[in-house]
Amino acid sequence: MRWTHWVNFPVLLIMIWSGLFIYWANDAYGISIFGFSLFKFFPKWFYDYFHISRRLAEGMAFHFLFMWVFFINGLLYIGYTILSGAWRELLPKRGSFKEAWQVLLHDLHIRTTLPPQKKYNAAQRIAYTAIILMGFGSVFTGLAIYKPVQFYWICWLCGGYHVARILHFAFTIGYVLFFVIHVLQVVLAGWNNFRSVVSGFEVVETAIETEQEIAVENSQTNNSDGKQI
Amino acid sequence: MENKSKESSKIPPTVDQKIKRRNFISFGVFFAASTGAIAGWEWLLKSPKEKFGITGGTRVPLRRALNKTELFFRNFFSNNHLVKTYPAEMAAKQVRINSLIGIEEDLHFDPQKWKLSVLIKNGESLNINLEEIKSLPKTEIIYDFKCVEGWDQIQHWGGVKLSDFLNHFKLDEEIKKQYMGLQTPNGKYYIGLEMQSALHPQTLLAYEMNGKPLANEHGAPLRLIIPVKYGIKNLKRIGTMSFSNSRPKDYWAEHGYDYYSGL
């Protein structure tokens, strides 16, 4: 599970990078009112800075290679999560949405107490489940755009070619936003937490500072993952 | 924790030592894997350019991936999978002209003298004029034309089904070949199709757009309309048609694009 997390990071980066090459060829999205463009995704300086222009063929070649890695890695993650029972820690429960609101208030320093939590708090449960659903959504809408005739039914389920393309784009924006918050939270959670995401265990210091204990938190949940924020 | 009992005969390592050891191993593996990933990426970016041939313009591993991916997705191809069609009112009046490669150089092109030349066995060729083609059953299609760049437009085309055309001229032997190649009269634009897609029931040799004869910039007098492919395969102004068991040359496949480019 840790492994798929770390594989996913560069792969998603490559998918977004090559996806931008493709998007550049017809950069249609933005918000305009009465023909006046208020806001357009990606101004010229952005394309220039990342050398995105005129690389459509290259973008497609990378996108259609790494889509396989993204897909297989996602399958491994979901498969492992189901088989190990780790999904119990991840799926939102009844009351998670209410609790997540309390977590949010706490994180924004509006509320001082935190609802009781196990490995993941309610907000994490929702966020991490959502990101998996988004990953599925990216593959699904991606297929709808990639083979709209052979997979006409996927295209239809996505609401047609245009809607599929917009959703595919929106999921990507979602990943970027997720990434920003995710990294911020990891920084706030501190080194010990980050270390656990790499090593798979967490050090819990007991009241007497000289006495440390390894809490291999597998004991409870049978999974080898660290506590993530 | 399990280690504790096994190692009890020796001096048991302190908890601190265990933490250090596990961290050392974990981070060691983590950095080794990261380094490997970066090295792999560098290798891919600097991997050899493919030798220019039927395909070109990209790197060897990327081309290999495109070709393998083609083989995988060709399993899903079926003549029963049809592109969605629309009522005629939804067709664009201003049909987008994205490229004139292969026809713009022909300033003195004379549609009256045009004939489609079909290269058949033993170097023979059939030369077919537009009247003969127009006398075949006409098929019309209003569908969403898709460009590899990402834009699309609902367009209205009329012509003869390519499969009807091939059957009418008794090109049975040619149909058994794996590929069809098409070129503009001046040979500046050319495409290759697997026979499967060429024989798809929605693939047309079109001579009409929005109910009127094709304008020059849309590929007069006869062009290919193939909804199961991106626009790059929809060759304007067909000059010659050929058949082969190896991939015919293809303009955009030489420029780093996927040869298949199927939808």
Image: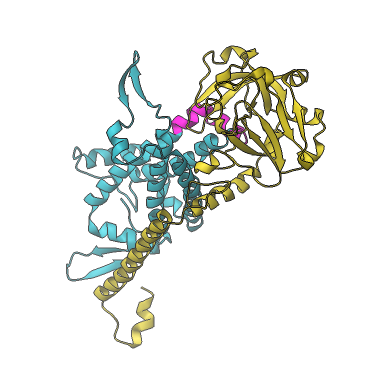
Chain colours: A cyan, B yellow
Total numbered labels: 0
Question: Please, what is the dominant secondary structure of the magenta stretch?
Answer: helix
Q: Is residue A203 above or below residue A153?
A: below
On the question of residue A92 being in view, the answer is no
- Nearer to me, B251 or A130: B251
> Compared to B53, does A156 lie above or below?
above
For this rendering, which residue is in front, B176 or B106?
B106
Residue B19, image x, y percentages: 28, 71
State yes or no: residue A162 in magenta.
Answer: yes
Q: In this view, does B25 lie to the left or right of B250?
A: left
> From the viewer's perspective, is B232 left or right of A66?
right
Q: Residue at x 32, y 64 (%)?
A: B31
Quadrant including the N terminus of chain A? bottom left
Quarter occupied by residue A16: top left
Q: Single out the residue that lies furthest toward the bottom.
A: B9
Residue extending furthest left?
Answer: A209
Name the residue located 45 percent from the left edge and 44 percent from the top edge.
A58
| Left/right of residue B177 with respect to residue B20 in the rendered view | right
Asked whether A191 or B119 is in front, the reply is: B119
Q: Provide the residue span drawn in magenta.
A: A149-167
Q: Nearer the viewer, residue B149 or A118?
A: B149
**Residue B51: horizontal and vertical position, in percent?**
52, 53
Question: Residue B180: x, y in percent?
Answer: 69, 38
Location of residue B7 (image quadrant): bottom left
> Would residue A184 be seen by someone viewing this image from the given angle?
yes
Q: Position of residue A7 (x, y in %)?
A: 41, 55
Residue positioned most to the front:
B108
